[in-house]
Image (cartoon, rainbow, N blue to C red):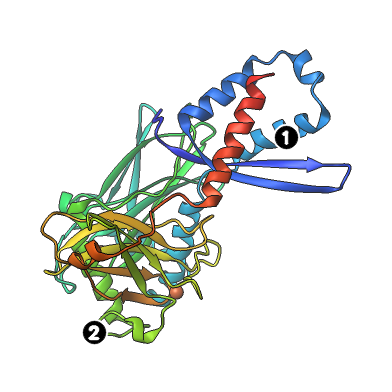
């Protein structure tokens, strides 16, 4: 199991006397998750019986929380692709094999592993990396649902790797069938045939935010420019500050000019990060004075109050600009910032984890301390 995977964990604290409850949510690394589950499994039944009832409720809901925790980001991605399918292709369901095998994600299962390949080889779907918005054509995402509609695997694909578009993963425990989806930047959302799983695996499902590889940055930018030029935006260039501060990505540089941070919007109104609607800043990236991309990160809208990122500035860069793409409101470019000017800045805001993140860590530490003393 990959111990670097992070899970969102829910802890519901029920207070029967006051008749209310509080719900905590924090992300946690698999390694820690394994440790917590191990502690649970070593508890003697009498230890559980003698627990205060409140702790029993918390323990039960904590375990339930693990089960429901995976996949918020992936659900948001699927919801947005479904929205775009209707907007850009005028159908409210994914295309399927009746539209041709070239775009269909086919699943093959072997030794507990599932492999998804887009196309049947006659042909495979092309993966055309390009800085030209009129040329770039690739499968940007493959994701897989189980029999209950839970997304158990998602991967962003790098067009530079070439065809076929393929991804593999270990089949999670509890899986009885799998159905794969893929998004082609030009031809929309496609679903493949459902495949039965004879032998379930032993791993937990994982589905989390993945950042684009550096090689894919130019193609992703080209595709965003292409989308900006198409309805509903129909613009030949990105929107700027003159169209509103809420969508504008603003850069703050560190005092020594070696790094920076970006936030979309201002204190008056930050851009929303709503994973349910969904409406969010899907990606932020940075260009230098030569329009070369020097950093790019995808964003998860769930459980954050604003869109932000940090980045390092390569030596020799004189000017930086931030770009962002809102899934509903298109491509935006913020005001350029001179890197030299940063040296004269008296005060800069350090990039740091949000207070909410500290709270989440504190809750997690307190929780682990509590279990460790049982
Ligand atoms: Fe395509
Ligand atoms: Fe927006």
Q: Where is residue 349? Give x, y as percent.
A: 39, 59
Picture residue at 27% right of the left edge, 81% below the top? 229
Q: What residue sits right under mark 1 in the picture?
A: 58
Residue at image x 41%, y 70%? 327
Q: Position of residue 199 (x, y in %)?
A: 47, 28
Which of the 4 quarters of the picture holds residue 300? bottom left
The answer to whether residue 170 is above or below residue 220 is above
x and y percent of residue 49 in the render?
81, 19
Query: Is residue 325 shown to the viewer in this render?
Result: yes
Question: In the picture, residue 130 is in which quadrant?
Answer: bottom left
Q: Looking at the image, tell me whether mark 1 or mark 2 is earlier in sequence order.
A: 1
Q: Nearer the viewer, residue 322 or 57?
A: 322
Density class for disc 1 (Cα within 10 Å; few <14, some 14-19, many ≥20) is some
62 above or below 276? above
Q: For the residue labelled by badge 1, is the local secondary structure a helix, a strand or a loop?
A: helix
The one of 180 and 26 positioned closer to us in this rendering: 26
**Helix, strand or loop under label 2:** loop
Instruction: Find the distance from the CA under tag 1 to the CA under tag 2.
Output: 54 Å
Total numbered labels:
2
Query: Which residue occupies the extreme right position in the image?
Result: 17
Nearest the eye: 160 or 214: 214
Which residue is denoted by mark 2 in the rendering?
236
At a point 29% along the width and 59% down the height, the residue shown is: 103
Q: Is residue 199 visible?
A: no
Q: How far across and down, in percent of the image, does residue 282 sit?
A: 39, 63
- The quadrant of the rendered image in which ligand 2 is seen is bottom left
Q: Is residue 116 left or right of residue 11?
A: left
């Amino acid at each position: 199991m990959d111990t670097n995977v992070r899970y969102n964990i829910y802890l519901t604290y029920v207070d029967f006397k006051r008749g209310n409850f509080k719900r905590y949510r924090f992300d946690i690394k698999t390694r820690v998750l394994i440790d917590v589950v191990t502690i649970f499994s070593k508890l003697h039944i009498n230890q559980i019986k003698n627990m205060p009832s409140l702790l029993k409720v918390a323990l039960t809901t904590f375990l339930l929380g693990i089960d429901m925790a995976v996949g918020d980001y992936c659900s948001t991605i699927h919801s947005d692709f479904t929205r775009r399918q209707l907007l850009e292709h005028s159908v409210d369901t994914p295309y399927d094999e009746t539209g041709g095998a070239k775009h269909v994600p086919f699943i093959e299962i072997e030794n507990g592993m599932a492999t998804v390949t887009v196309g049947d080889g006659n042909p495979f779907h092309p993966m055309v990396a390009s800085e030209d918005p009129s040329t770039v054509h690739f499968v940007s995402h493959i994701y897989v649902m189980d029999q209950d509609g839970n997304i158990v695997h998602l991967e962003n694909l790098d067009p530079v790797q070439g065809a076929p578009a393929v991804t593999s993963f270990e089949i999670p425990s509890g899986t009885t069938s799998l159905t794969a989806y893929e998004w082609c930047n030009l031809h929309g959302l496609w679903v493949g045939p459902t495949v039965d799983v004879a032998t379930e695996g032993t791993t937990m499902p994982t589905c989390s935010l993945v950042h684009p590889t550096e090689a894919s940055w130019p193609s992703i930018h080209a595709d965003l420019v292409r989308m900006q030029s198409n309805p509903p935006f129909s613009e030949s260039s990105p929107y700027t500050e003159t169209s509103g501060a809420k969508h504008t990505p603003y850069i703050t540089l560190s005092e020594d000019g070696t790094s920076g941070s970006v936030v979309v919007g201002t204190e008056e109104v930050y851009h929303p990060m709503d994973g349910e609607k969904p409406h969010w800043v899907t990606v932020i990236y940075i260009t230098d004075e030569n329009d070369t991309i020097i950093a790019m990160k995808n964003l998860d809208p769930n459980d954050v109050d604003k869109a932000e990122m940090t980045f390092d500035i390569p030596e020799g860069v004189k000017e930086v600009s931030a770009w962002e793409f809102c899934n509903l409101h298109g491509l935006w470019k913020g005001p350029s910032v001179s890197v030299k000017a940063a040296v004269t800045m008296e005060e800069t805001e350090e990039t740091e984890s949000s207070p909410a993140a500290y709270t989440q860590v504190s809750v997690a530490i307190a929780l682990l301390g509590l279990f460790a003393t049982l």
